[in-house]
Amino acid sequence: MADAAWFAWCFDHGRLHTFAAVTAPWCTAAWVRLHGDTEAEALQDKVGRFGSCVYFDQLSADQVAEVLKPQ
């Protein structure tokens, strides 16, 4: 599945996005790519890195810097 899709958490939409590996990401909002080959693994990575934050305004300054870093 790693070649089929990858996951990102979107802090503008407050949800997990799934992007096809062969196309450009369709969301132009503030998202961060997550590690994991499944939704469950990606969500574990999101919680590990960003805790319970769902939206951009809930992030710490360090987390904002990570999200805004070029992907």
Image (cartoon, grey):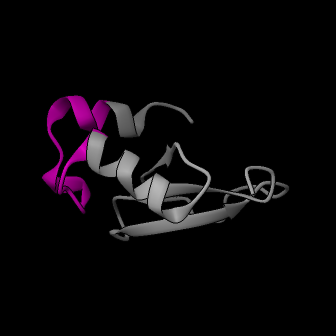
Identity of the residue drawn at 51% across and 64% down: 39
Residue 20: x and y in percent read 75, 62
Residue 66 placement: quadrant: top left
Q: Is residue 60 magenta?
A: yes
Identity of the residue drawn at 28% across and 42% down: 48
Please identify the residue farthest to the right as the structure is shown: 22
Q: On the rendered structure, is 55 left or right of 17?
A: left
The quadrant of the rendering that contains the C terminus is top right
Range of magenta residues: 49-65
Residue 55: x and y in percent read 24, 61
Labels in figure, total: 0
Residue 31: x and y in percent read 45, 52
Q: On the rendered structure, is 61 left or right of 26?
A: left
Q: Is residue 19 above or below residue 34?
A: below
Q: On the rendered structure, is 27 left or right of 10?
A: right
Q: Is residue 50 magenta?
A: yes
Residue 68 placement: quadrant: top left
The quadrant of the rendering that contains the N terminus is bottom right
Identity of the residue drawn at 45% across and 66% down: 16
Q: On the rendered structure, is 9 left or right of 4?
A: left
Residue 69 placement: quadrant: top left
Identity of the residue drawn at 28% across and 50% down: 47
Q: Nearer the viewer, residue 22 or 4?
A: 4
